[in-house]
Image: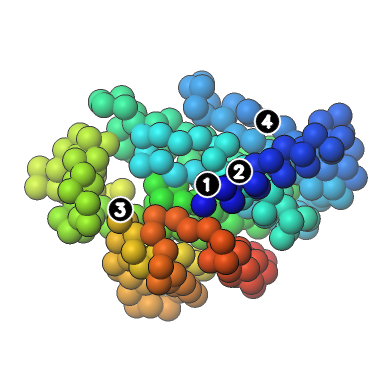
Amino acid sequence: MKQLILFFCCSFLLLACGKDDTDAGNDTSKSKTILNVAYGSDAKQSMDVYLPANRTTASTKLIILVHGGGWTEGDKVDFNPYVLLLQQKFPNHAIININYRLNSGSINRFPAQENDVKAAMEFINTKRSEYFISDKWAILGASAGGHLALLQAYKYASPVKLKAVISFFGPTDLVDAYYNPVNPLVPLLLQNITGTTPQINSIIYEQSSPVTFINAQSCATLLLHGAKDPLVPLSQSQLLQVKLQAFAVPHQLVVYPNGGHGWDGADLVDSFSKIETFLTQHLN
């Protein structure tokens, strides 16, 4: 997967160097890239904004990206290959790739990351007329970013009610993840980022779990998971699937039999094909 990501990163840089979009100003007929836009006072509260040519507030849809890294590491640049792939699939869509504060010991414990995603959404909403984007938004995340994307999609109906959410192997039930880990380090990680255990404070675990907030009005959901994931077991997506089925929420669970905590090659190509079909249907 590293080789594939390196290839896409190189392609992304070449594409960026070849585009004269940084001087586009307010000319909406040209594409525009704005890097490291601050949505808060912390250095990590920033986002990269990719606006398509011929954008309008009536028709330009938005895809928001949330990177992974166990809530303790990672950066929006990790998703640059995904930005390129999505631009190829959806050339008329805006894409915003966000950073958020990372946990380190007792610093930035939950719900800091959740609050940052919400703050980023609120900031983007204030920029809709400036960016010329509509209120048709989807959110995509991987691993911890998948968890944060799902939590935002189900827990909050404002500032914009999301039309669709996509999760690459994101945790969905932190209580279950604590008590039924596939890796013995997972409970330690969860204890560190929450500052407690489910026995002591079950509320923070429940309030940080996407499964808690599913209802009949929840947005369409695409779950992508590897059957051999050594960190976030497939059962996490299956638990969410059961809840989505109970409330008749449109959804799809795609399982990659040989996939671990991420995959590449034909499976990754298939993932983005599934994403293209899903968003074409539900981001309306």
Tell which tag, 1 or 3, sits nearer the viewer: 1
Report the mark closest to the observer, 2 or 3.
2
Residue at 65% across, 46% down: 7
Number of numbered discs visible in the structure rendering: 4
The residue wearing badge 3 is 231
Check residue 113 in the rendering and tell me which mark sits there, or answer none.
none
| Residue visible at 72% across and 32% down in the picture | 34
Whether residue 164 is visible, yes or no, is: no
Tag 2 and tag 1, C-beta contact below 8 Å: yes
Q: Amino acid at mark 1?
A: Lys
Image depth: mark 4 or mark 3 in front: 3
Q: Position of residue 197 (x, y in %)?
A: 14, 43
The disc labelled 3 sits on which kind of residue? Leu
Mark 2: which secondary structure?
A: helix
> Which label was assigned to residue 2?
1
Which label lies toward us, 2 or 4? 2
State whether residue 116 is above or below residue 175. Answer: above
Q: Which mark is residue 6?
A: 2
Along the polypeptide, which appears first: circle 2 or circle 3? 2
What residue would you read off at disc 4?
Answer: 35
**Percent position (x, y) of residue 273?**
63, 68
Q: Secondary structure at mark 1?
A: helix
The numbered mark, 4 or 3, whose residue comes first in the sequence reads: 4
Q: For residue 89, say whether it is visible.
A: yes
Disc 4 vs disc 1: Cβ atoms closer than 8 Å? no
Give the left or right position of residue 11, taking residue 182 as reference.
right
Badge 4 amino acid: Leu
Residue 179 placement (x, y as % from top left): 15, 55
- Secondary structure under tag 3 reads loop
